[in-house]
Amino acid sequence: MIAITSNKTSDERIQEIVQFIEKQGVQAHVSKGEDRTVIGIIGQADPKLAEQLRQMSGVEQVVKISKSYKLASRDFHPADTVISIKGVEIGGEQLVVMGGPCAVETPEQIDEIARLVKAAGGQVLRGGAFKPRTGPYSFQGVGVEGLIMMAEAGKKHGLLTITEVMTPEYVDVCAEYADILQVGTRNMQNFDLLRKLGTIQTPVLLKRGFSSTYDEFLNAAEYILAGGNPNVMLCERGIRTFETYTRNTLDLSAIPVLKSLSHLPVISDPSHGTGRRELVVPMTKASVAAGADGLIIEMHTDPDNSMTGDGVQSLFPDQFAHLLSDLEKLAPLLGKKFDTKKEAILA
Amino acid sequence: MIAITSNKTSDERIQEIVQFIEKQGVQAHVSKGEDRTVIGIIGQADPKLAEQLRQMSGVEQVVKISKSYKLASRDFHPADTVISIKGVEIGGEQLVVMGGPCAVETPEQIDEIARLVKAAGGQVLRGGAFKPRTGPYSFQGVGVEGLIMMAEAGKKHGLLTITEVMTPEYVDVCAEYADILQVGTRNMQNFDLLRKLGTIQTPVLLKRGFSSTYDEFLNAAEYILAGGNPNVMLCERGIRTFETYTRNTLDLSAIPVLKSLSHLPVISDPSHGTGRRELVVPMTKASVAAGADGLIIEMHTDPDNSMTGDGVQSLFPDQFAHLLSDLEKLAPLLGKKFDTKKEAILA
Amino acid sequence: MIAITSNKTSDERIQEIVQFIEKQGVQAHVSKGEDRTVIGIIGQADPKLAEQLRQMSGVEQVVKISKSYKLASRDFHPADTVISIKGVEIGGEQLVVMGGPCAVETPEQIDEIARLVKAAGGQVLRGGAFKPRTGPYSFQGVGVEGLIMMAEAGKKHGLLTITEVMTPEYVDVCAEYADILQVGTRNMQNFDLLRKLGTIQTPVLLKRGFSSTYDEFLNAAEYILAGGNPNVMLCERGIRTFETYTRNTLDLSAIPVLKSLSHLPVISDPSHGTGRRELVVPMTKASVAAGADGLIIEMHTDPDNSMTGDGVQSLFPDQFAHLLSDLEKLAPLLGKKFDTKKEAILA
Amino acid sequence: MIAITSNKTSDERIQEIVQFIEKQGVQAHVSKGEDRTVIGIIGQADPKLAEQLRQMSGVEQVVKISKSYKLASRDFHPADTVISIKGVEIGGEQLVVMGGPCAVETPEQIDEIARLVKAAGGQVLRGGAFKPRTGPYSFQGVGVEGLIMMAEAGKKHGLLTITEVMTPEYVDVCAEYADILQVGTRNMQNFDLLRKLGTIQTPVLLKRGFSSTYDEFLNAAEYILAGGNPNVMLCERGIRTFETYTRNTLDLSAIPVLKSLSHLPVISDPSHGTGRRELVVPMTKASVAAGADGLIIEMHTDPDNSMTGDGVQSLFPDQFAHLLSDLEKLAPLLGKKFDTKKEAILA
């Protein structure tokens, strides 16, 4: 960390700042410029120190050199994290495809979609039982019943399941029924939820906040890791930009950047990331080309009548199957493996 | 609501869409253009209908004409909402100033600051007991103890109190000790929290999400109102923009816009809205000139040593007092009343 | 186009609005809702009409249904535009790679880089002779001399050339020496420049403004097309977002969206789009997967010492060659052709 | 300036970087941390050095401590710049109001509006003769004729005039007729235009680019100042944000920030800054409260029929007069003077 004084800071004040720093058990290294003085802080500083320095009079700027997250950082964990769930490995060579409807609606719906996801070569069934909605009058999901329907469909067809959890008190019941818990974009900084997820071992797919920086995203992951749950995957799902033609702007640079800053697996969500069915196919391929470890894609047998209104971004089953078959060809050229004909991988 | 078809939609498909609309119990009014056909929907449609239409094939665009929030809208409630708490009226002629530290630290600190807020003419004491922090290793607040300290200081000095609540399970204890509950920017769309706040009557100050639109903000307020709590005030606290010199960009246009779209009181937070002490004074005055009903301002007796690192945006006590004395002169020219010498208004 | 009245507009005022519309030679179709009245405008309206209606009292909202650009729109020109320059076809099956330094520096530098671009399989040599720079004290390019150096290098090695033109008065000299003229991101709405480019036939690569919407981008292209120059290609080069880790955020969704809204070729610039060398390789592949017709990539023999300071985003020659060889394998799976061993395509 | 190496940079490489720095005639001061090494650069470095260091391998981050603009900076010019034009002083105690239509239309229109601006107490007549328009088919202004009409109206009514100049070749003719030249938001980085404006002495009102940072804005001003024209005023006119309800988001924090970073006068444009008539009044007052030196406000006698479609943001003459009369009362409380009844100030 470096503290830079203003050009009006007196030598006396600089001395006081140095003393303050040294009282924290770290060294201060003063370097006088023509204009401003630079104080380098050497040693393991308390994370609070940056904030404290920033507010001291005479200090103009504080530059953090080390990152504020540690457990999520590749500096401290050079090897890729591979999360293994019932034989599916996420973050390794295998490309992982999660498919399914925005919301679980009926047992028949989720069963049929599970069958189609499996047949196309997907490994994970997605589906929302609790839905976060901008307005209070929109469809909010079918609740715990939906969890049960999805768990059954997953089991029957040999698929892992993933579902969104919105509040700390529902973490346990969701973890009982689903293999992976998803934290939605609006909850990326719901710190109580993150803390609760740190207390269990169920893998978590953490979606990036739609206006969050990479640094904030990795700090959110750090909350879960610091709590003791190492099984976190990062999901790029589009950011808010000025463009209104697409629902969000899928930031594919996030994929190689996050893979370089962190060891955690990175998943791409081209469905929410674009909000338009016709963009899901090219953006899925582009995600894999950018280095994604997996994809989470909406697919629906009757998108015109989906209950959430997200049908407009859901693939039809044949588009989904065709896309996965294309991925099978592309993956080997991009350092991944994907086999649509693989035997059921789950016992 | 209007649905616009694409230029390739067949007459047959238009007929199907019309039938679908009429099945929902509303009328469809078809208007054929050279290129596209416009279908007007007349009557009280289910809020889900817009979403359903948007995903139907053949429909290119859906334009909502009515707003998706009702209880928050001035259309349905033309008169200003005035929230009255122990003699302080928020949203009326009186200008309301909430002042205090970012975080409650010790009984002495909060007592001394309460004394200074009162002496300067403020009506509400602010202070955080639970702090939302980007990284897991930052100071997270002193918890319930802080609530108690603040309640005592408020009572002793004749001030209302406001504090942030971060999770549904803490709503009850916060409401026990504080007069107003604050929802922070990261929780504006924490829907479970909003729902819980709808079940009580304690006034809520809802902060705008740092990347939220006015429409999303009013829909979040709608969650609380729809639950049965009419005592909601809206707080503009700065949005995220490309500028990094300021912590956020305080959007003062939000004040007259929200006052026109909604009947709820609007409060401005120039401290978080700018993140820099030297900007708090001009932006406070500008907030009042823009029509704010009140202000929430950070003030600290020893900002260099505040525990959260937010001291850099806290006013010193004399700056705070000087500012309030300036507001006393400005307010009458801007349609408000503010009297720094007023007798204690709380019993 | 649709005009929507406010809920307070009187029938009389609606009548006046209708009369105003009909005076413009188009039909007005009134559709009364419970709350608001919708007026559909049918026929070829003057583009000014939307603006006029928007400002009439009683009108709350105007929704354009047709696009404001025509020549750039796929609605009016369903087939892909293929721009053919000395045997290189841009916008067709062939993938086109433009490579070279940010700025032309010396004859030796540009000659050596041209040789390497050609050897790797590229078809176009890029290089700036005039450089737009944020501050007045930065290196501003070598000027017309640079144009001559680049033209010679291109000719010698059998490459087309592309260079940036910054002001109308330099269009003619740039067109004399270069095969393609580039309009930079800061000039996307330099309307005098666009108009001047409409008066010639030299192909133009128009870069998207870093905060522009797709609609504004296509309207800027429309300026050139409307002037009489049909040879326009669109270039996605990254938008400004909150993220500061990358220089810009490359918006790859722009590729399939622009290909669907328009018939013009779409080129991706992963160098400026990311600003970091290590991201150029994955984002180039992702661009091709998203459907790009071509790429413009910075490559430098000595990036540590490039004169513009853009070396940090330039590939080394061997990275460039390796990348193009990877593209050769990927392209056929993505509907394109790319042959690094092709004979010189230019006479 | 500070260069920070990566945690993998060898001592040897650090030595090379130091040697490179010292070859530029400045000192390098090495400070070894546990993790990374910090190299402080002491002395007057060439502005290019930052860019060169940033691209050197082994360097992870370069932090500029000094600003890249000098002439625009208050560090180098502590006193406020006051621009005096025919007795009107901009940047001093006097509040300056510029009013008028978006576009000059006819001699009668501009004469009548000039009369009303003067009667209300304004000092400058605004009006566009050349209009920058997003689409090529919109009204583009009446050209040089408009300049003449406006000059006559200004002279007759004792008002200064301001008009927009869009391209270097029109600078001279605009300067012949108008007292102040305006650079529009889309041209803030039209560097050839800025350079041309540096060669004359006519005062320039430079509008902030709608996505520009303060630093970029001040660097654009630096272009004009560095050319030799010291008469530059900065204009905040709203930035692009996610909000679509307003045309732009007027960033009033820009006013105190720019006043603190720079000595140049700061003008606010609440008309373009909001795009809605009903917001112009509160945002004008808020601008003055935030410390603006002046305002540029659209006013039209017949906004429903303005030719540019900007009527929706134009005040009616009586609103304008009423607003200026309110400013007369507010200004003294905010450190400014404004006298609506003042005798004609121009000879």
Image: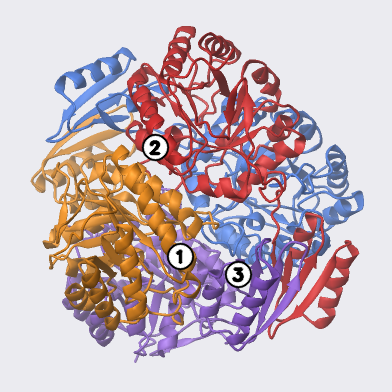
Chain colours: A red, B blue, C orange, D purple
Relative height, residue A164 to residue D149 (above, below)? above
Residue A75 percent coordinates (x, y): 68, 51
Question: In the visual, does D153 lie left or right of D70?
Answer: left
Q: Nearer the viewer, mark 2 or mark 1?
A: 2
Let me know if residue D95 appears in the view. Answer: no
Residue A321 percent coordinates (x, y): 37, 22
Q: Residues within 10 Å of mark 2 (few under 14, many from 20)?
A: many
Residue C347 percent coordinates (x, y): 13, 65
Query: Which amino acid type corresponds to the residue marked 2 in the rendered image?
Result: Lys
Per the image, the residue denoted by label 1 is: D212
Question: In the visual, does A18 lie left or right of D42?
Answer: right
Query: Which amino acid type corresponds to the residue marked 3 in the rendered image?
Result: Val
Tag 3 near tag 1, CB within 8 Å? no
Mark 3 falls on what kind of element?
strand
Query: Which amino acid type corresponds to the residue marked 1 in the rendered image?
Result: Ser
- The numbered dot on residue C31 is none
Nearest the viewer among A104 and A31 is: A31
Letter of the chain that mark 3 sits on in the rendering: D
Relative height, residue C267 to residue D73 (above, below)? above
Per the image, the residue denoted by label 2 is: A285
Q: Residue at x 57, y 33 (%)?
A: A184
Q: Residue at x 66, y 24 (%)?
A: B199
Mark 2 falls on what kind of element?
helix
Question: In the visual, does A20 lie left or right of B81?
Answer: right
Letter of the chain that mark 2 sits on in the rendering: A
Tag 2 near tag 3, CB within 8 Å? no
- The numbered dot on residue D62 is 3
